[in-house]
Structures are given as structure tokens and as C-alpha cells.
Amino acid sequence: MKKTLLLFCWGLFTIGVFAGQTQASLFEVKAMRNYKGVVEYLDNIVKTYGQNAQEFVLGDSDSGQKIIGVKVGNGPVNNLVVATHHGNEYGSTEVALRFAYTVAVKPIAGQTIWVVPVLNIGGYNAGRREEMSSTRGKSYDPNRNYPSPCGTEGPFTLKSTAALARFIVEKNIVASATLHTFYPAVTYPWGLSTKDLTTGYESIFKGLVQTAAADSHYKTGNTTDLIYAANGSFEDYAFMQQGIWSLLFELGSTHNPSPKQVEDMIAVNVPGLRRMMESAPAQRADKHSFTGTCDRSRGRADRHDE
Ligand SMILES: [Zn+2]
């Protein structure tokens, strides 16, 4: 009898270990994967936590593939995390995937979180910053591809950026985090070529970047001041057009993080992303147009993102 009980307990133990290993390998960090691997990760989230998470299609991309994301939770406030506007910044994809996994395990009360781990699929698969337009025969920087009062390299010459712009309207996105590598910093609008950098919501934005960076101890502040001016970015567009509380995360200290460095980025940023979403206002900003003057002399002198 004792022997049977012992065998039974051993059986339970081995099943437990096996299940634990399977679970871990489904959601493991990689230094680099292709887009197929990203979608498999999302499939695994949905298979395991289907009660909280479903896949969605953001739209078509110039690569010919669908841009897939995961929707987590069912709350009335819709918030967004987008990684890899720049295809070579795979560390940001890994942070987005782990964030999606953690909110699928424990959704944020009152919110629906939309996570797009790779916006620029062609660039991601090729390890290239830019994205190739299928109709224009040339590449564009996706994060200079939105309309902007101080200039743009677009607007919307890529299917991906046009799809994201439609999406934030359709879903009434209230707060967004875009993930890039590297600086490290967490910043807020305006990131334009201007000396008129205040939006009128400095204290709200300061609170958000500080809570986002509480574990990482990344630098925080205004994008142009801290990093550089970049006209035509999603972060400015989302705030300017829709009043979305839009933060820019420049993660880690390299575009080529090792698996250990990816783990470190995840450890200090995933909790911060969650806190940012939990503490963001539940409504968009009322006054969000840019009323300053563009100043081209504030420009491209100090770029960390190339
Ligand atoms: Zn970037």
C-alpha cells in the first residue's frame, strides 16, 4: 500500500516537473527569432490562457503577411503596446512578448490591452531597421512615417503604419507604449524639432515615465530633450492626433542584446509597463494639438537610435 502511494506521489511529481518544463519552454526568451516564431509564441499564449487572451489582426503588411497581435482582458479602457517599428530592434519584441504573457496570466483590471510584438515584419525577419514598401520599391523608416507638423518621411507610405493609425481610432486607444532599443530611457512628447516642447500635461507624463522606470532606473524626460528630435514618429502622432498618453521606451543599451541582456530588459521593464498602464488616465487628453513653432536646427545631431 505504502509502495503504491509512493509511486502515485512520484507520478504526480514527474507530471508536475514535465508540465513546468513545457510551460517554461513555451514562453522562453530568445535573443532572436523570426516572425513565425513570434506568432507561435502568441499562439501558445492563447492556447494556455484562452480565457483571457485572443489573437487579432492589425492589418496587412508590405511583407505580404498579416500583422498579428494579442488582445488581453475585457475591460472598457483600451491600451496598446507596440514593439519593433524598427526591424532590427528584436529586444523590444521579446519585452512585448513577455509583457503579453504576464498580462494574460493576470489581466489588468478594467482594461483591454492590445499587444503588437512586431509592427515591421519585413525588417524584423531581415534584421533591418527600415521596412520595404511593396508598391513603391523603396524602404522607409516606419517611425518617421506618420504625419507631423515639422516634417515626415511619409506619411503612410507603409501598410503597417497606416494600419496602426486606423487601429488607434477604431479601438479608442487611451494609453500607448512603443518599445524600441536602445538608450536607455523612457520619454514623452513632444519629440519634434522644436523648442516648444511642453504639451500642457507635463505632470501626468512625468508621473507615467517615472513609474515606468522605477525598476529600470532608466533616464526619464521629454523625448527631444533627452534623446533627439524625430519628426513623423508614432509617439507624437498618437498624442497629437488622438490625445493618447503615449510613451517611448528606448530599452537596454544595445541593438544586439544577448539572451541574458534580453532577460535583464524584461525583468526591469515588464513590471514598469504594467504600472504605467495601471496608472495612466482612463480618458484621453483633451487638448493635444501642437501649437508651437518648428525649428529645424533642433535636429539630428545626437541620435542613439541608428
Ligand atoms: Zn527604434
Image: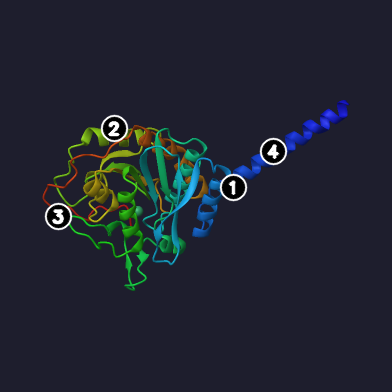
Tag nearer the camera, 4 or 3? 4
| Closest to the observer, 253 or 191 | 191
Tag 2's secondary structure? Answer: helix
| Closest to the observer, 29 or 65 | 65
Q: Position of residue 279 (x, y in %)?
A: 34, 32
Residue 258 is left or right of residue 182, and the answer is: right
Q: CA separation, marks 4 and 1? A: 14 Å
Residue 279 is left or right of residue 199, and the answer is: right
Q: CA separation, marks 4 and 2? A: 42 Å
For residue 297, which numbered disc appears in the image? Answer: 3
For residue 26, which numbered disc appears in the image? Answer: 1
Q: Residue, x 61% and y 43% (percent of image)?
A: 23
- Residue type highlighted by circle 4: Val
For residue 207, which numbered disc appears in the image? Answer: 2
Whether residue 28 is visible: no
Q: Position of residue 11 (x, y in %)?
A: 77, 36
